[in-house]
Image (spheres, helix red, strand yellow):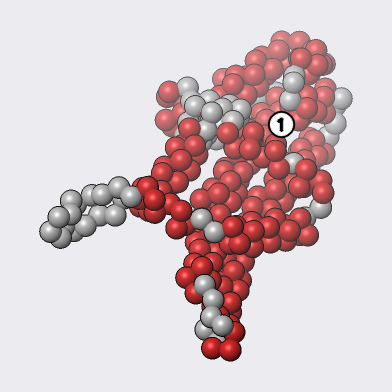
Amino acid sequence: MNITYIIGVVAAILVFLLGIVMPINVPPEEGQSIVEFHIEYLINFFDAASIFIVIGCTFAIVVASFPGKTLGSIPKHFGVILNSGKFKPLEIIDQLVELAQTARKNGLLALEGKANEQEDPFFKQAIMLIVDANDPDKVRAILENDIECMSARHEDAAALYDKASSVAPAFGMVGTLVGLINMLQSMDPTSGGGDLGKDMGTALITTLYGCILAHMIFGPIANNLRIRDGEEVLCKEIIVEGIMSIQSGENPKALREKLLTYISQRDRDTGGGSSGGGE
């Protein structure tokens, strides 16, 4: 579980809400305490028109900007960012060293059975490529191209939230203009006046909603998706290097030392299974 993401988002929301209901009086005036709680202030920050403009328009523009396949993957994205323990480089290194030992004793053809035991399609493909005696350059080219294409798909997913993060504040400003226009129209003596406070509230609150969506919701999601991409790319790069070394007949002990250079010294010492996030 990605505890840091959950803690960060929840803390940001709580601090924001406390800032609304808990004004701090420094120095306190007569009859006031330094900290007061006014739950009724929360209603001042709710405006249905602002919510409709910011969330509705942001959602509509995101839908217009990306294909249905990318949009349909949104539920999966939350599973990805919350699962911080999926990628474990040390476990992969151990498996590669075991494969190297098997290959040195029984030859590359003995790895076919090990390939069929793999749940990771990329790892299985990498093993089968050397079992089938493909040229080393061809093996590396195929595997590296697979990694590049995977990373490009992941970047498309993160770009969806980047787009939402940039659009939300923009429509916050649109809502501000709508509120200001309505307020100015209400100030026209020929119009009979109007609710200036409500119009001004819409003008300001839409900007607030846009900033909250961009920086509390969409921004952290995009960043966490890129972190998960980096973790998966690292694991696959270890697989590529390990497979190429096995094909060349490298000593298992030397292979382990080479592959350990891909992870931090702390993870080597503590046996950390993932390059980021908390479990």
Q: Residue at x 59, y 37 (%)?
A: 81
Q: Residue at x 67, y 30 (%)?
A: 239
Direction from residue 64 to residue 186 in the image, left or right:
left
Q: Is residue 8 above or below residue 202?
A: above
Image coordinates for residue 145, horizontal then vertical, percent: 77, 44
For residue 154, what is the image quadrant? top right
Residue 96 in sight from this viewpoint: yes
Image coordinates for residue 158, horizontal then vertical, percent: 65, 50
Secondary structure type for disc 1 = helix
Image coordinates for residue 70, horizontal then vertical, percent: 77, 47
Q: Residue at x 80, y 39 (%)?
A: 142
Residue 214 in sight from this viewpoint: no
Q: Is residue 17 above or below residue 262?
A: below
Q: Specify few, some or many for label 1: CA neighbours under 10 Å numbering under 14, 14-19, or 20 or more.
A: some
Q: Nearer the viewer, residue 206 or 59?
A: 206
Image quadrant where one finds the N terminus: top right
Q: Residue at x 71, y 42 (%)?
A: 74
Residue linked to disc 1 = 244
Q: Is residue 50 above or below residue 43?
A: below
Please identify the residue farthest to the front as the structure is shown: 192
